[in-house]
Image (cartoon, rainbow, N blue to C red):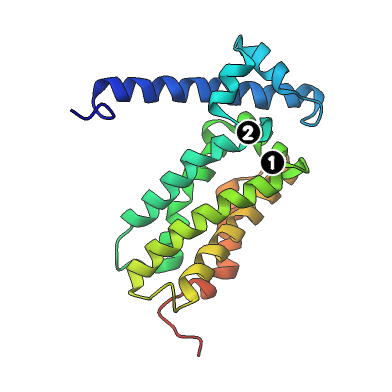
Amino acid sequence: MDTNTGPAANTAERERQLVCDELADAAVKLPADQGCEGTTVDQIVAAVGMSRRTFSRYFDSREDVIVHMLAEAGVHLCAELSARPADEPHAVALRHALPVFTSLSVDNPDKTLRVSRLILGTPALPARFLERQSQWQTGMTGILARRTGLDPGAELRPALAAGVALTAFQTGLRRWVDGDGTKDMDELVDQAFAVVAPALDLTTNPS
């Protein structure tokens, strides 16, 4: 019998997710008061009544806790892109996959703004953010290659298109943060995509 599936495994995964989310919430709220560099793992675990040993079962560092919140979003991003209609223009498909991120600015604007400020404004975090983006880009590249029939090992275009789309999103995100969340993130990302849309056309061979 496979013990890794079924109700018990689902319950364990839900419990794990709850612990991770609780730690992540504390890791975001504390730096808002004292700055990320001044926040320690001991303070994070104390805020949620957990031990440092428990923390170590889930994360390696405080930075990992904050960036953890992006992991699921990346999975959903790739799922959304994979589900887009095969005949849809690639720029449109990529743009429609991004509301998994932009909707957060509407559903939970205060938390999204805090997390985004931390990631973009803390020296140790942009590198972790880029690591996540690299993972997303790899997944998106494979999906774009399947949509177009291009070989990602021989063709640069799927990887470039994925990278350009993520850069367009990050540009809109940074503008949204710089504006203290007062602007519409979807509109900002739309503006960025309007500029890069020609580079996302994988049907035209640049050579």
Q: Residue furthest bottom?
A: 207
Q: Which residue is located at x 62 percent, y 35 percent?
A: 64
Crowding at dot 1, Cα within 10 Å, few <14 / some 14-19 / many 20+, comes out as many
Residue 171 lies, with reference to residue 53, above or below; the image says: below
Q: Nearer the viewer, residue 26 or 184?
A: 26
Image coords of residue 144 (percent x, y) = 40, 66
Q: Nearer the viewer, residue 137 or 57?
A: 57
Q: Which residue is located at x 66 percent, y 40 percent?
A: 116
Q: Which residue is located at x 59 percent, y 21 percent?
A: 55
Mark 2 is on which residue type? Ile
Residue 150, picture quadrant: bottom left
Q: Residue furthest top?
A: 49
Dot 2 or dot 1: first in sequence order is 2
For mark 1, give the secondary structure: helix
* Pointer 2 with pointer 1, Cβ within 8 A: yes
Q: CA distance from mark 2 to mark 1?
A: 8 Å
Q: Which residue is mark 1?
A: 119
Label placed on residue 66: 2
Q: Which residue is located at x 25 percent, y 29 percent?
A: 5
Report if residue 54 is visible in the image: yes
Q: Does residue 73 appear left or right of residue 33 in this picture?
A: left
* Quarter of the N terminus within the rendering: top left
Mark 1 is on which residue type? Ile
Residue 7 lies, with reference to residue 168, above or below; the image says: above
Report if residue 181 is visible in the image: no
Image coords of residue 52 (percent x, y) = 64, 17
Q: Nearer the viewer, residue 106 or 40?
A: 40
For mark 2, give the secondary structure: helix
